[in-house]
Amino acid sequence: MNNAAAAQSLSDRTSGAIQDVLSGRRRGGVMSSLLFVGPAVISSIAYMDPGNFATNIQAGARYGYTLLWVVIMANLIAMLFQALSAKLGIVTGKSLAELCRDRFPKPVVLVMWAVSEVAAMATDLAEFLGGAIGFSLLFDMPLMAGMVVTAIVTYGILLFESKGFRPMELIIGGLVGAIGLCYLIEMLLAPVAWDQAALGAVTPRIPDAAALAIAVGIIGATVMPHAIYLHSGLTQGRVITRNDAERRMLLRFSNREVVVALAVAGMVNIAMVVMASSAFHAGHPEVGEIETAYHTLTPLLGAGAATIFLVSLIASGVSSSVVGTMAGQMIMQGFLRFRIPLWFRRLVTMAPAFIVVGLGVDSTQALVVSQVILSMALPVPMIALVMLTGNREIMGGFVNARLTRIVAMAGGAVVLSLNMVLLLQTFGVSIPGLEG
């Protein structure tokens, strides 16, 4: 018996222990609760990726604490949609992409897949570039060399996916912890005006058109299309629920994890804006690039703060690049029933980043543009998720309550409205109150 237990993988043992908790054979408690931690933690890294660094630095440097309310609103919307994605996977046993393929007309499915693939490529562009920028600055190497290092490290981590779900959850969880610790230290070093930060967090205001573009970028960097697809799939292989009672218990643990994991992600994003505001807004509002932020931090807050900033950027870039590749594979497999080799998927998703660097495009600006692209693609999974989780034929007794549907539709409407305003602005249509 002991030999058989020793032969089980970590993932198998975790699944068995979760099943024991759900069936009542194992008592609850802190250690039992930790067994359920994983899917939301992996998904949460999408809310702390290098695209967040780029948009949050620009938000804080140019507008101080003014756009903090956008970060908080985006994080609350993210909590709701990640919880719905997890619920869809737990109740149906299928991912969002699979259900879209099964439930929607084929032309719609192909369009959804195409839009989602563009979003996945934009995601990986931001993540891969962020890690490469971090390596190049920290170790004083060319950006192209940093990209090669990022590629090797991310591919090495992706190999752990073959060992089951638990090793990957622990690795990503460790990197999330590293990012959070780095920004906790940054908050202790930065001279934060907490009264102004509190005001910016609760006072909705868009000062001008440029602020609108950054606000939409923040939403694109926070509520991520690939994370919505991914979360539903991450719940599939962890444990098999046998009845509605076990599903309800699993959903309770899942919802708690979503709230905690995304609250941590939200605090990291808030810390990014606060750090940029306290360090740059008063004397260096022009700071808008990650490289400039690093070099400016050194004389302002010291070499330690600048180094911690790069460590957090590398942890973010590597972990989010891994998660982005996982999500891209899940999207393709769900929509098309087609799976490609891991190395080829990694190669394809790296290509845009190498092209951007090869053409000499400003890397931070590419990060910000990628987040706007993500925000444009975001309504696709959001609308699909609201439709599917509100369908009683699919969800049975777990169908969304009326209040949940209303709040989800309101969140989707906010994103769609901001996207529409940005599109009008892009095509030269004057928006009252947003000139300049």
Image: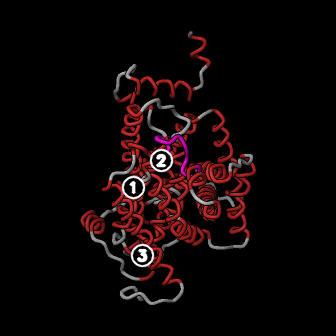
Inter-mark Cα distance, 1 to 2: 31 Å
Q: Nearer the viewer, mark 1 or mark 2?
A: 2
- x%, y% of residue 173? 49, 41
State the residue position of label 1. Answer: 266
Q: Is 102 left or right of 244, judged from the image as shown?
A: right
Q: Which residues are magenta?
A: 89-98
| Residue 215 falls in image quadrant | bottom left
Q: Quadrant of the N terminus?
A: top right
Q: Nearer the viewer, mark 2 or mark 3?
A: 2
Query: The residue tagged with tag 3: helix, strand or loop?
Result: helix
Asked if the stretch drawn in magenta spans residue 367, the answer is: no
Q: Residues within 10 Å of mark 2 (few under 14, many from 20)?
A: some
Q: Is 67 left or right of 136, judged from the image as shown?
A: left
Q: Which residue, as the protein is rendered here, is positioned at the far front?
A: 393
- x%, y% of residue 138? 59, 56
Colouring rule applied to residues:
secondary structure
Amino acid type at image mark 2: Ile
Q: Quadrant of the C terminus?
A: bottom left
Query: The residue tagged with tag 1: helix, strand or loop?
Result: helix
Can residue 133 be seen by looking at this rendering? Answer: no
Judging depth in this view, the residue of 21 and 398 nearest the camera is 398
Q: Mark 1 or 2 closer to N-term? A: 1
Inter-mark Cα distance, 2 to 3: 46 Å
For image coordinates 39% across by 82% down, the residue present is 208
Inter-mark Cα distance, 1 to 3: 20 Å
State the residue position of label 3. Answer: 62
Asked if the stretch drawn in magenta spans residue 97, the answer is: yes
State the residue position of label 2. Answer: 394
> Which secondary structure dominates the residues rendered in magenta?
helix
Amino acid type at image mark 3: Arg
